[in-house]
Image (tube, rainbow, N blue to C red):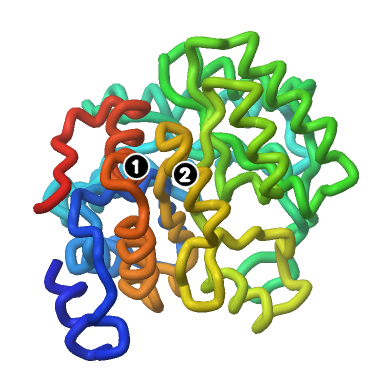
Amino acid sequence: MKTLIVLLLLTPALSIAKIYNGTLVDAHSQVGPLISNEQVSKQIINNDVDLTLLSIRGKWDSATQRYLSIQKLTNQKTKYLIPTKLGGFTRKERDNSKVIRTIKYLRDQALNSNINYVGFGEIIVQHAPHNHSKLKYEGINLDFKSERINKAIDIVLSDKKPVILHVELNDYEEDSKKILSQLIDLAKKNPSEDFLLMHMAQIEFSEAEYLLNDTNNIHFITSHADNEKKRQMKRNPGKAQMGWINLFDKNDNLQKRWLDLMNKNPKRFVLALDNVWDGHWLKGYSTRIYIWRKALSSLDKQAALLIACGNANDYFKLEIKCLEER
């Protein structure tokens, strides 16, 4: 809260905006090898997010201990999402059995360490190539008939946790109809389970309406669907994914069609920031939080409370109080 007050005082043009001051859950962020436990913990403590669901990148054999360290340093302001993409899960040439064993190992290690994990991190189905100083990556384009993807989903479902999926409908436009059809089949085969699509799945508005109308258990995670991601794409064209969608107008307000869709379907959207790189954590974090609190204030009160906290609380069984005012 202190960070938000300082930001308002230093930014007079923003201070007149209405702000949502309820409980805020970041339903998916990550910590990689380019930032220390102490640095990321300081950011979590000092920024205006009440609870962060956190997965770990980098070396699989130190992931559990990294999380335990951060949990202690943040005074329990985090909950654990067991990593699903370590051990080479996102590398096409890796053996399926090996990457699945890694997920099971990390789950067993969390249980042995008495970590009350609330879910699993994103399962990468599609990911565009990266040509960036921080990541050189050839990309991957699987689907829901892939053995690797189905085995990972089965692990999550066996634990009765929500399934977080990373698909890129724009970056792999040629396969978007196939992926949408397979998503609907997956949801209908598992009607009592929840499937959450990272980064809004890079979905077009008409496709989002279609999914919402044809399923009851597919939900959208809002991460990287804002002006900051658009600005980053302009700064680094062609370096990574370029298919991101933007829920906002040029003034950092939710576009009316998306605002109306969220108000109409408040149980189907989940807030997340998905900080990944050191730059996400150390630069612009508080500004992105402010922009989302401003956006939430433009929604109906019940929709704002559900998207900011209530849906994550329900799907991940967090057992926290979601307050309209803190």
Q: Position of residue 143 (x, y in %)?
A: 78, 30
User: Image check: 27 left or right of 218?
Assistant: left
Q: Is residue 152 visible?
A: yes
Q: Position of residue 30 (x, y in %)?
A: 43, 53
Crowd class of label 2 (few under 14; some 14 to 19; many from 20; radius 10 Å): some
Q: Earlier in the sequence, mark 2 or mark 1?
A: 2
In which image quadrant can residue 85 be found? top right
**Of residues 98 and 324, which is closer to you in this image?**
324
Query: Do the numbered discs 2 and 1 sit on residues whose CB atoms are within 8 Å?
Result: yes
User: Image check: 278 left or right of 78?
Assistant: right
Judged from this view, the residue extending furthest toward the right is 174
**Residue that numbered label 2 is attached to:** 262
Q: Residue at x 25, y 65 (%)?
A: 19
Q: Is residue 113 visible?
A: no
Q: Position of residue 22 (x, y in %)?
A: 19, 52
Q: Position of residue 153 (x, y in %)?
A: 59, 22
Q: Residue at x 28, y 69 (%)?
A: 39
As measured in the structure, the alpha-carbon distance from the residue carrying label 2 to the one carrying label 1 is 7 Å
Q: Residue at x 46, y 55 (%)?
A: 274
Q: Amino acid at mark 1?
A: Ala
User: How many numbered discs?
Assistant: 2
Q: Amino acid at mark 2?
A: Met
Q: Residue at x 57, y 15 (%)?
A: 154
Above or below, 302 against 134 in this view is above
In which image quadrant can residue 6 be found? bottom left
Please tell me the numbered disc located at residue 303. Answer: 1
Above or below, 218 against 204 in this view is above
